[in-house]
Image: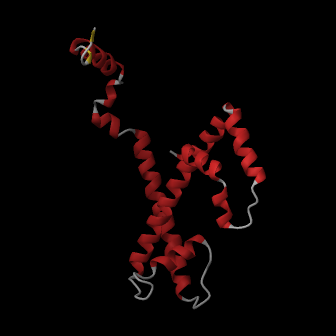
Amino acid sequence: GINAEYGYSPEVLADHVSKILEAIPKPLFDRYRYFISQDKVDMTKMIQKMRKDLMVIVVQRTEDFKGMGEAKSDDLIGLLIEANMSYNGVDLIRPVHVVESVVDDLMTISLVMDNMVKQLCALFMFLEKEPEVQSKLMAELRSTEINNFRDLAKLEYTEKCLLEGLR
C-alpha cells in the first residue's frame, strides 16, 4: 500500500512504473528503428521535394516582382516576397535570401495549415458529441452581426471554442 503521509509506498510506485514500461512498445527504446523508419524517410523526401518545387516558383515570382514597379502583387507569395525584400522597408537584401525566406515562410504556412485543419476537424467531432456546446456556439454565430474584421471580437464563445480546439 498506501503510506498515509506520502501517498503510495515506494514498492507500489515501482510496480506501477514497471507496468507502464512493459506497456511501451520496445522499438521506442531502439532509437535507430524508431527515428529512421521508412515513413520518416518518405516524409523527409516529400518535404525536400516540396521545398525544391517552391524554390522554382518563388525564384520566378521574385524575378517577376522586380519588373512590376509600383503595381505589386496582392497574392500570398507576392506579399511574402514584398515583406522579405528589405530588412527595414528601405534597404534591399540579396535575392537569394529573399527566396530562402519566402520558401521558409511558405513551408511554415503549409505545415501549420495542415495541423490546423486536423484540429478543426477534431473540434467539429467534439461539437457533434456535445450538443449543448454546439447549440451555444451556433446561437452566438447566428445572433452576432459581422460587418468587418473588428466585429469578430464579438464572438467570444466562438473564439474560446476555436482556441480550445487548437490547443
Residue ranking furthest to the top: 1
Foreground pick, 37 / 83? 83
Report whether 21 appears left or right of 144.
left
The quarter of the picture where residue 30 lies is: top left
Q: Residue at x 43, y 52 (%)?
A: 45
Residue ranking furthest to the front: 5
Q: Residue at x 46, y 64 (%)?
A: 52
Residue ranking furthest to the bottom: 69
Q: Residue at x 41, y 43 (%)?
A: 40
Give the color scheme: rainbow, by chain, secondary structure or one colour: secondary structure
Report whether 127 appears left or right of 50.
right
Residue 58's place in the image compared with 48, above or below, is below
The quarter of the picture where residue 10 lies is: top left
Residue 139, horizontal then vertical, whole percent? 75, 45
Total labels: the figure holds 0
Foreground pick, 49 / 25? 25
Residue 156's place in the image compared with 101, above or below, is above
Residue 36's place in the image compared with 7, above or below, is below
Report whether 80 appears left or right of 31.
right
Q: Residue at x 62, y 42 (%)?
A: 121
Quadrant of the snapshot with the N terminus: top left
Residue 44, horizontal then vertical, whole percent? 41, 50
Residue 47's place in the image compared with 2, above or below, is below
Report whether 39 appears left or right of 7.
right
Foreground pick, 63 / 29? 29
Foreground pick, 148 / 15? 148
Residue 39, horizontal then vertical, whole percent? 44, 40
